[in-house]
Amino acid sequence: MNRRDFFKGAGKGVLASLLGSSWLSSLSCLSPKPSSDEFPFPYDSDAFEASERIVFLNHNEAAISVIPKIGKTLEIKFYAVEDKNFLARKAPLGSYRVKDCLDIPVQNVLGAPEFFYCLEYREEGKRGWRRTPERKVRTPKAFQEYGKMEVLLISDDHTFDDGDMPQRIVMDEGLKSQRLSGDYVNLFINELKANPDFIPDETTDLGKMMSGFCLASSLNQILKNEKPDLIIFLGDTTGIGAGYKWKGLGLKDSQDNLTDQDYDDISRILWLRVRRMLSALTPNIPIYLTLGNHDGELGFDSARIFARKYRKKFFKQPGARQGCSPEENYYALIWGDPSPGESNPLFVVLDCESNLDKDWPKKPEEWKLNPEQREWFKKAVRYSSDWKFIFFHHVLGGWPTGSDEEMRDYCYGRGPLFTFEDYKEFCRDPNLVEQVELTRIMMENEVKANFYGHDHIFHVKEIPVEKGLPRKKMYGICVGSTKHKGELGWYKGDLWKKYYGSYGHFWTEPAAASEEVDFWGPAGYTKLTISKYGTRIEYKRGAYNYLQTNIPPFVDVGDVVESKIL
């Protein structure tokens, strides 16, 4: 039975026949196994808290992050070569005694378009070395070598939603533990590798964790079919800034009188959860982060200092050493060979959230970068490149309502509003809106596109050019979401329809609302392909979530939903 038959109703209740009657009960007893070249698990859980993570801080500086199991001290040898044939015979580049999270510097192999590495490790004082699988990594040098690169953009996975709603109450204690740890995403990936047609029955405990399943399905597609040079997450992946979800996930209730130690513990658990969820990718693909409003670093978030502490600990990003923020919350990546005469892609990541001091802004003019970030941005965007891209969680302004349009007491940052004309309806002087000035700066410096999340859809807007600015096209692109459900209530709002357009047919509706479709809902991810001959974006279906989206049921997982040349 194929997926389409399942979704058309013929497959209702077929999960047991697809997987075997004992499968559901046995899965709840699964625990992480030591890693090998194949699944069942992407890391050795006896030795590590998560897989290792590769990160490039600039064209000639990289690190491998390792996190030993709590309470264990590991001896680790690091091997790296440009030619895979020499990996087994090469002497280690470094030997380390590791008790806490450590970033191992990568040296001597970054001048080639790719390199290979592995780790040997053992618990201190014990015999017998174990070895991770051999990892292959593309370096920034590959862009000049091959004339092409691919960037994947993932946003708003909202896996923390899996513990919140009454209909998502999970009874099995083993699955609850896997959900909180993040390892349930790897268990879903494992099952999808064995059975590509696997879909959880939503009446079971597994089916009450669908945001995790949809993320796992997207990651599985990436593992099977994509070859990205890097991945950028555009926010809302931890849930540290969503305290109302904590109790449902199995943490302390955010309404209790929590101590600093409680916030420290929760922040560590939830950032480590992200490392585990992404463990199938982090050893080979550099993953970078954009802060969202649910990631715990809003100026008024109670867990802010602890959220930042563990983000920096578990997800190192370019910082002061690379001329970026010391807190690594906003930064620039120049991807390629910085030799004179070369043009390299520039990726600039902004932090929209940290400058909020006491509460949500009441109007678009109150959304601001702090002065240090604003001045840094003006300099960073001057870099000479044919491919300049800006990333943030949402616009610095937006229409003046809350998370939905019925809320009028705060401004949540909704919508594709970039220019003076966009804000004339909402502001006495649109020049006071930070986004208007940022847009002008981007156009003056010939930025090609702005990418953002927050609104959980894929939508492309060609931003009108103001008089007197360069006439090259610039785009505002909402990159979609891997989450389970689209927000039909949002789609019917007046401002939403004005600025985003029609959703077409939402599949829970008995009849089509419209044949015209101006944007696409979950579940999906965006692929950005950059070459010396052009730039293309594609929105790809990441998971089957039939009846919860406006993506048609006949669009297969991995298929392109929409494509556009920039």
Image (cartoon, grey):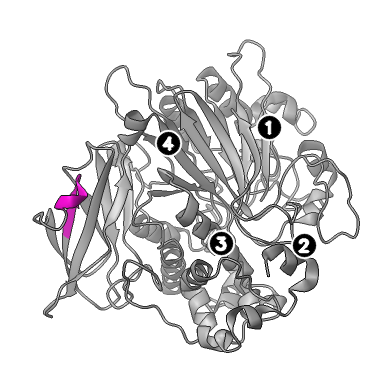
**Circle nearer the viewer, 4 or 1:** 4
Specify the farthest residue to the front. 1
Q: CA distance from mark 4 to mark 1?
A: 23 Å
Secondary structure at numbered mark 2: loop
Determine if residue 244 is in view. no
Instruction: Determine which of the numbered discs, if any, sits on residue 461 in the image.
Output: 1
- Specify the amino acid type for callout 4: Met
Secondary structure at numbered mark 3: helix
Between discs 2 and 1, the one toward the N terminus? 1
Q: Are marks 4 and 2 in contact (CB under 8 Å)?
A: no
Q: CA distance from mark 3 to mark 2?
A: 17 Å
- Specify the amino acid type for callout 2: Leu
Percent position of residue 23, x then y? 56, 85
Q: CA distance from mark 4 to mark 2?
A: 35 Å
Q: CA distance from mark 1 to mark 3?
A: 28 Å
The residue beneath circle 3 is 217
**At 38% across and 47% down in the image, what residue appears?**
327
Q: Nearer the viewer, residue 141 or 387?
A: 141
Secondary structure at numbered mark 1: strand
**At 73% across and 30% down in the image, what residue appears?**
423
Q: Are marks 3 and 2 in contact (CB under 8 Å)?
A: no
Looking at the rendered image, the quarter that the C terminus falls into is top right
Between discs 4 and 1, the one toward the N terminus? 4
The residue beneath circle 4 is 149
- Specify the amino acid type for callout 3: Ser
The residue beneath circle 2 is 547
Percent position of residue 441, x then y? 54, 23
Q: CA distance from mark 4 to mark 3?
A: 23 Å
**At 67% across and 48% down in the image, what residue appears?**
455
